[in-house]
Amino acid sequence: MTSEPLIAGRFAIRRLLGSGGTAAVFAADDTLTGRRIALKLLHPHLSTDPATAEAFFEEVRAARSIAHPGLAEILDAGVDDRIDPPVVWIAMELVTGVTLADHVRAHGAMAPADVATLAVALLDALAAAHEGGIVHRDVTPANVMFDPGALGDRNQLARSVRLLDFGLADIPGRPSVGGDALLSTGAAADAGVVTSVPYASPEHLAGAPVTEASDMYQLGATLYVALTARAPFTGDTRAVIRAHLTAPPPLPSVVRRELSRDWDRLLTTALLKSPADRYATAAKMRAAVPGAAPVAGETDAVTALDPDTGVTRVYRTRIPAPTAAPAGVVPPPPPVGSSRARRLPVAVATAVVGALALVGVVALSAAAGSAPSAVPTLPPSTVPTAVTPSPTPDPLPAEPAAVTVPDVTGAGLAQATEQLIAHGFVVGAVSRVDAAVAAETVLASDPAARETRPAGATVTLRVASGRNAIPAVAGLTAADAAGVLAGAGFGSTIVEAGSGTPGLVAGSAPAAGESAMVGTAVVLTVPRAPVPTVTPTPSVTPTATPSPAP
């Protein structure tokens, strides 16, 4: 029996945590340090291109000067060229948590007090990034993680919040038009923007310079999701882009009546079209968060659970002070084809989990011959500064191609989600109902299987809760009752006791109508048939017959 070869001579892969278009993230054991880590590996077909590897290591360099506990730690990085093709890797710390996107999808909108705590923690992390000269450019619910067990506890929740994925980070003021070696190909590689469209700022979509105010816009959209369980603008990609460019900011109180006007003011200010009209800095937006208060203590280490528990992971940091380096000097990445895996400074830190984030690539080229799926852009000078739509909007491309919804009935939720995403759909709300199948089994989708929808459409799922109601079986024979229970997802066992008609079920435990976990063995009470009493027949004493007289 052969064991899995060690990556870079030290990392033993244990299980897949997630995968995206550019890389996969594994739980792995670092045999050099003896710790369990998250190992991010560039996909093999991308690792042979030096430009692609360089872009991969841009995540490592993006936030080298940022020191904040809400960002993630890079433990090491390198290239293992002993394997063909070479393996490009980044080792990261592994801890527990859930993404805001997953939490809202499973549980709906969050309590305003928890959203306020989330907002303050994220704004503190962004302030540190901005002070270090970095604009994040991809603040989305998928890139925000926290400990769900800390909800309701302001200090505990704040300490658990992490801002992930600096893979799209850049310096402030740089135009966002341009190729991305990891996420763009063809025409989009020459002129395009890489962004998550539902949360992109107008200037980002228009290819204009992206600044700190752009992060405020994306955070406003992210907080809108936390408060309402829906994105600020919905529809197909074209409609969402046009809304970001021209539509008025939505008020969260329209969706959720109990929200205060302070929340309306915070989010509408963050979502204004002109960067000059938004909060200029993270600190100014932090001061406007309803109910915001200083959080006691500093973020400390979070103990990692065993990956075999299946808990979602997040990569966090205890970033040390940046090592001294001459101004403007950035440590080069390990070159592809190097004779050994080279170590990068541990002080280099960034929030990286780009392989797990769903990122839309929107080509913004006005030249003829652009890709059919490209969306024309407004020149930077014409980015809307008011909410009135342009009287002569840019021409839009043809409707996205129709895609058939795959049949995910009977699959697990995770498997169904991967399958829908692979077909170009977005997974929307997930509702849980009682059924006779195991928990998280998909029961139905909307749209249903084999229906057609445009690529990028949202598919909602109905899944099993893992519980079901005990059916009424009183009066049935034991065999018939067992069949009914099996159809409802339960086992059965028989106890002969009680009174009633012999051979027929008198009752069950749990009782009919009660909710129980699927697979529970239901105890059936069946009265025992009476044993007939046998009366002994009295013995007959024979009477002697006298002999006749002679």
Image (spheres, rainbow, N blue to C red):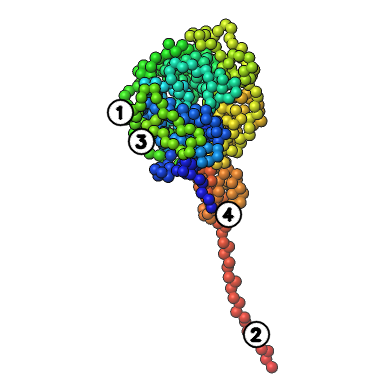
Q: Nearer the viewer, mark 1 or mark 3?
A: 3
Q: Nearer the viewer, mark 3 or mark 4?
A: 3
Task: Give the crowd class for mark 4: few <14, some 14-19, many >=20 residues within 10 Å.
Answer: some
Which mark, by number, is residue 75? none
According to the picture, the residue beneath numbered tag 1 turns out to be: 296
Q: CA distance from mark 3 to mark 4?
A: 64 Å
Which mark is first along the chain, 4 or 2? Answer: 4
Residue 521 drawn above or below residue 239: below
Q: Nearer the viewer, mark 3 or mark 2?
A: 3
Q: CA distance from mark 1 to mark 3?
A: 15 Å
Q: CA distance from mark 3 to mark 2?
A: 111 Å
In what element is the residue under mark 3?
loop
Please, what is the three-letter code of the amino acid marked with disc 1?
Answer: Ala
Write the residue at 59% across / 21% down. Answer: 187
Callout 1–callout 2 Cβ contact below 8 Å:
no
Which mark is first along the chain, 3 or 1? Answer: 1
Residue 36 drawn above or below residue 196: below
Residue 93 image position (x, y, % from top left): 41, 36
Residue 32 image position (x, y, % from top left): 41, 44
Residue 370 drawn above or below residue 37: above
According to the picture, the residue beneath numbered tag 2 turns out to be: 545
Residue 116 image position (x, y, % from top left): 39, 23
According to the picture, the residue beneath numbered tag 3 turns out to be: 301
Residue 539 image position (x, y, % from top left): 59, 76
Q: CA distance from mark 1 to mark 2?
A: 116 Å
Which mark, by number, is residue 502? 4
Write the residue at 65% across / 23% down. Answer: 401
Please, what is the three-letter code of the amino acid marked with disc 4?
Answer: Pro
Which mark is first along the chain, 4 or 3? Answer: 3
